[in-house]
Image (cartoon, rainbow, N blue to C red):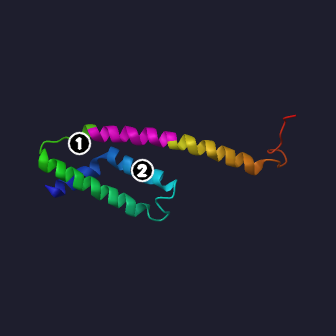
Amino acid sequence: MFDNIVVEVGLLVGFSALVSFLVNLLKIPGWVADGTADKWVAGFNLAGIVALFVVRLIIPDFNPLPIDNVMAEIATVGSFIMGYVLMLFGSKFTYAQTKGLPGIGKTYSG
């Protein structure tokens, strides 16, 4: 049964996407250090396998696909929001760095 659960978790695309999103989100405040993301992903995946195993022991005919679809949507929307926020801060940073440069850093305000 455990072998089947390991394969099933590997097929749950939403879970994988959510794990990837969470690890990248945790990098922003520095809670996940550069170079350790693979360990965090492995830990989250192990937690997912154990959780699915426990749920399957309690509810043998549990279908994780509806929950996986919700996880995929959360990861997708979260990635868009995170990308948008990073784009806003990236634009402010770029503007500050190019301010005053000839051609591209010209200001037209009075």
Q: Quadrant of residue 50?
A: bottom left
Disc 2 marks which amino acid?
Leu
> Which dot, 1 or 2, sits closer to the camera?
2
Q: Mark 1 to mark 2: distance in Å?
A: 19 Å
- Is 61 situated left or right of 28 in this image? left
Rendering coords of residue 54 (x, y %): 17, 52
Rendering coords of residue 71 (x, y %): 34, 41
The answer to whether 27 is drawn above or below residue 12 in the figure is below
The answer to whether 43 is drawn above or below residue 16 in the figure is below
At x 12% / y 47%, what residue is drawn? 58
Residue behind mark 1: 64
State which quarter of the image contains the N terminus: bottom left
State which quarter of the image contains the C terminus: top right
Rendering coords of residue 45 (x, y %): 31, 56
Element type at marker 2? helix
Closer to the chain start, of discs 1 and 2, is 2
At x 37% / y 51%, what residue is drawn? 19
At x 34% / y 44%, what residue is drawn? 14
Residue behind mark 2: 22
Per the rendered image, the range of residues in magenta is 67-81
Residue 24 on the magenta segment: no
Most prominent secondary structure in the magenta stretch?
Answer: helix
Element type at marker 1? loop
Disc 1 marks which amino acid?
Pro
The answer to whether 20 is drawn above or below residue 66 in the figure is below
- Is 96 situated left or right of 32 in this image? right
Q: Quick one: label 2, few (<14), some, or many (20+) residues within 10 Å?
A: some
